Amino acid sequence: MKKTLNALLNLDTLVAGVGLVLIVVMTVAGVFMRKVMGRPFAWMEEMQIFFFIWTIFFGGSVAFRTGSQVSIDLIAVRLSPRARRILDIVDNLITVLVLAYLTKGGYQLMMSVTKKVTPYFKISYSLIDLAVPIGCVLMIIQYSLIAWDKFLRDREAAQEEGAEA
């Protein structure tokens, strides 16, 4: 049971990792076929786009979960602990709102291209664009869990400081 739960929780890592490996393998094979054999793959670009989009949005979820997203804390490190907590709350709210907006936009994009298919494999662009709302929802979940955990740790630290005083 625990193994199954772990596998589900790390599904985004698997999707992003497999996608990245496939992009590299396809690109190397494509360069070889084009430059050495003189016979490029006709389907290369559409599959690269498919795997790039899925890798980006599922990789974003992994980055949020592991705390690896880009962060510029030039101002935040100079603030008092109280001001830093307020900034963190505002930052968390803005991040979740932006991701929610991207989720809505990704869903609308996915629904607007239901009849459009890729030229070679005839894959629906809706399937390609499905990565946007799924990835954004996963990022919202990951970011919310991290923010909640940080909030609880900050609260415990504040209570311990109050008890010591």
Image (tube, helix red, strand yellow):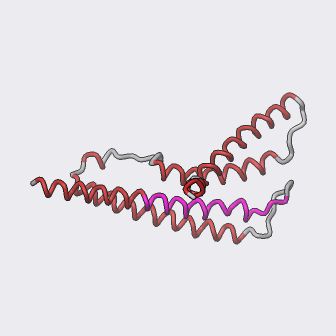
Q: Is residue 39 above or below residue 60?
A: above
Q: Is residue 77 above or below residue 4?
A: above
Q: Main secondary structure of the magenta part?
A: helix
Query: Which span of residues is magenta-colored?
Result: 122-145
Q: Nearer the viewer, residue 49 or 165?
A: 165
Q: Quadrant of the N terminus?
A: bottom right
The residue shown at (86%, 46%) is: 42
The residue shown at (49%, 62%) is: 141
Q: Quadrant of the C terminus?
A: bottom left
In the rendered image, residue 87, in percent from the top left (x then y), is placed at 31, 58
Relative to 161, 14 lies left or right: right
Q: Nearer the viewer, residue 21 or 92?
A: 21
In the rendered image, residue 47, in percent from the top left (x then y), is placed at 77, 49
Name the image quarter holding residue 37. Answer: top right
Relative to 3, 47 lies left or right: right
Name the image quarter holding residue 61. Answer: bottom right
The residue shown at (28%, 57%) is: 85
Within the magenta stretch, is there residue 49? Answer: no
The residue shown at (67%, 63%) is: 130
